[in-house]
Image (spheres, grey):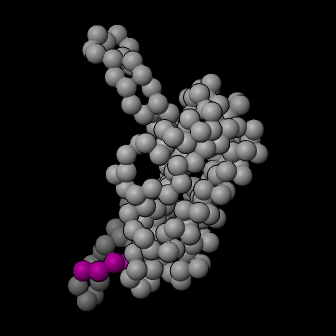
Amino acid sequence: MHNLFKPTPQGRGISGLGLFLLALCLWAVPAGAAQKSYHWSPRPENLKGLDGIVTRCVVSTDKNFVHDICRNLLNAAQRKVRAAGLKYGSAGITWERNPMQPYRAAVAGAGIAKPLMLEFFIRGTSARPVSGSVHVLASVGYRAAVEAGGNETPRSGRLLVWETAILGDGDTAKLVAALSGTITQRLDWLLGAFGK
């Protein structure tokens, strides 16, 4: 076996082959990671029986670019949901820790019996360069769930069926376009699972 860390005349060091392999690893790791797409698609069985999607965009700042991203995503979701033949409702832009009342009103207003909740959590800073992130959660409500074989009191809550996230920084207009555009494309992963 070749010793990559053999002594050199000046003392201990890395051989030429060791240096080459180290450079190859440093070059290959970022290139390979950048080419991979890490996401998960929703399981179609978790979407069966749902008759519509209700969106809401949750913000924690009043920065204009954050609200621009929200409007872009709400409009894109509305177009895509309606194109998929599903009912659509929106709770609009709400503040973090806002009660669920706007969501419930949107569900009732759209006449959706079994909704999927699609939430866009948008964060942004005003530092230079401007940075922002979008975290998307798609969930369905459940009631009276008990673990298989369990005898606990039934639980209720929300079941996460899909999520995705992105972050970036740079020029404000380019950041809004990049974050909105990427998430808009990723909505096809979710909507593609309906009807399967």
Residue at coordinates 56% horizontally, 69% vertically from top-left?
Answer: 68
| Percent of width and height locating residue 119 | 50, 49
Q: State the residue in front, 142 or 27.
A: 142
Q: Is residue 14 magenta?
A: yes
Residue 70 picture quarter:
bottom right
Q: What is the count of numbered marks?
A: 0
Q: Is residue 19 above or below residue 133?
A: below
Left or right of residue 185, residue 118 in this image: left
Q: Is residue 157 magenta?
A: no
| Percent of width and height locating residue 60 | 38, 63
Quadrant of image for the N terminus: bottom left
The residue range painted magenta reads 12-17
Residue 23 picture quarter:
bottom left
Left or right of residue 184, residue 149 in this image: left
Q: Is residue 170 visible?
A: yes
| Percent of width and height locating residue 11 | 23, 85
Left or right of residue 35, residue 131 in this image: left
Spot the residue most to the left: 11
Left or right of residue 86, residue 104 in this image: left
